[in-house]
Amino acid sequence: MIKVCNAIDLAEKLLESLKEVDSAAFPEHLRTCNSIYEKYAGNPDMFVLLYDDARLIGYMCNFPISKTLGDKMISGEDLSDTDMVDGKIDEYLPNNTYSLYLSTAAILPQYQGQGLANLLMGGFYEKILELQTRNVFFDRIIAAAATDGGKKICAKMGMQKTRELPGGYDLYTIIGREQIYDIAEKFINRVR
Ligand SMILES: CC(C)(COP(=O)(O)OP(=O)(O)OC[C@H]1O[C@@H](n2cnc3c(N)ncnc32)[C@H](O)[C@@H]1OP(=O)(O)O)[C@@H](O)C(=O)NCCC(=O)NCCS
């Protein structure tokens, strides 16, 4: 049975499964899960996971970045996923507003093309709404999409293409707290 859930236990076993999905879904130069995992492993809210029974078949990775990094990204600096770190991030703190960086979406090739990316996108927005109930807020979502599939997903999630980045990447954003929760709720209602 296919199901989507959020990672609670960021154990070593999960990293091995994430690496398997990464290796199958991405060419080597686009595989970032290892370095991102090492830097962010303190934050249990950063992975949306897709399982077929006990097997990890896909994931979406997102994490908070500092306002300064978000500003740099939007204003035109050439930053990659692994630059999105200025210190180790721990868990979200209540009564704070964050910039959220959507880093990766990947599904094992044999499971692609069946609409399963919608489950990851829905899981991502469910997480945003769940964090809101814990008084953790976002006022920007930022993504740099490298592939046609990534660009399609960003657009489907209601993100706006903001500019082109070197290396064929496109920068997508949702700016504004109200817009984020409005888009999240509409997305969830649409796929329910
Ligand atoms: C991107 C990815 C996660 C999408 O998962 P998927 O199972 O193929 O997607 P779905 O079947 O759920 O389709 C979701 C939408 O994306 C579109 N899509 C998926 N891959 C696409 C591609 N390579 N080019 C263009 N559109 C694509 C689908 O047509 C669909 O759009 P629609 O609903 O308007 O018809 C998956 O293809 C993947 O892992 N690709 C390799 C890694 C990658 O490129 N990740 C994104 C960059 S971070």
Image: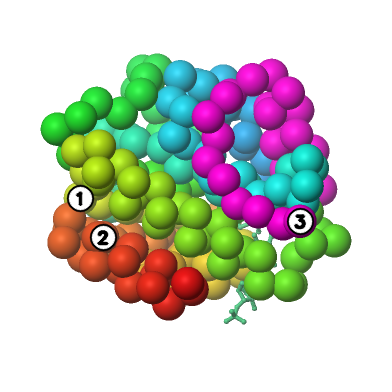
- Per the image, the residue denoted by label 1 is 139
Crowdedness of circle 3 by 10 Å Cα count: few (<14), some, many (20+)? few
- On-image quarter of the N terminus: bottom right
Q: Is residue 39 above or below residue 68?
A: above
Q: Earlier in the sequence, mark 2 or mark 3?
A: 3
Q: Which mark is residue 1?
A: 3
Return the disc, 1 or 2, that comes first in the chain's sequence.
Answer: 1
Answer with the quarter of the image where residue 126 lies. Answer: bottom left
Looking at the rendered image, the disc whose residue lies closer to the viewer, 3 or 1, is 3
Q: Residues within 10 Å of mark 1 (few under 14, many from 20)?
A: some
Q: Nearer the viewer, residue 182 or 27?
A: 182
Depth check: give the residue in front, 147 or 56. Answer: 56
Q: Secondary structure at mark 2?
A: helix
* Residue at the extreme right of the image, as rendered: 110
- Please, is residue 82 above or below residue 3 in the view? above
The residue under label 2 is 180
Q: Is residue 55 above or below residue 94?
A: below
| Alpha carbons under labels 2 and 3: distance apart | 31 Å
Residue at 60% x, 51% y is 4
Which numbered dot is residue 86? none
- Tag 3 and tag 1, C-beta contact below 8 Å: no
User: Looking at the image, which residue is at 40% across and 56% down?
Assistant: 125
- Gap between marks 3 and 1 measured at Cα: 35 Å
The reply to whether callout 1 and callout 2 are in contact (CB within 8 Å) is: yes
Query: Taking the image as four quarters, which one is ligand 1 found in?
Result: bottom right
Kindly identify the amino acid type of the residue bearing the numbered disc 1. Asp
Which residue is depicted at the point 41% across and 67% down?
A: 188
Q: CA distance from mark 1 to mark 2?
A: 7 Å
Find out whether residue 21 is within the magenta segment. yes
Q: Secondary structure at mark 3?
A: loop
Magenta highlight range: 1-27
User: Dot 1 lies on which element?
Assistant: strand
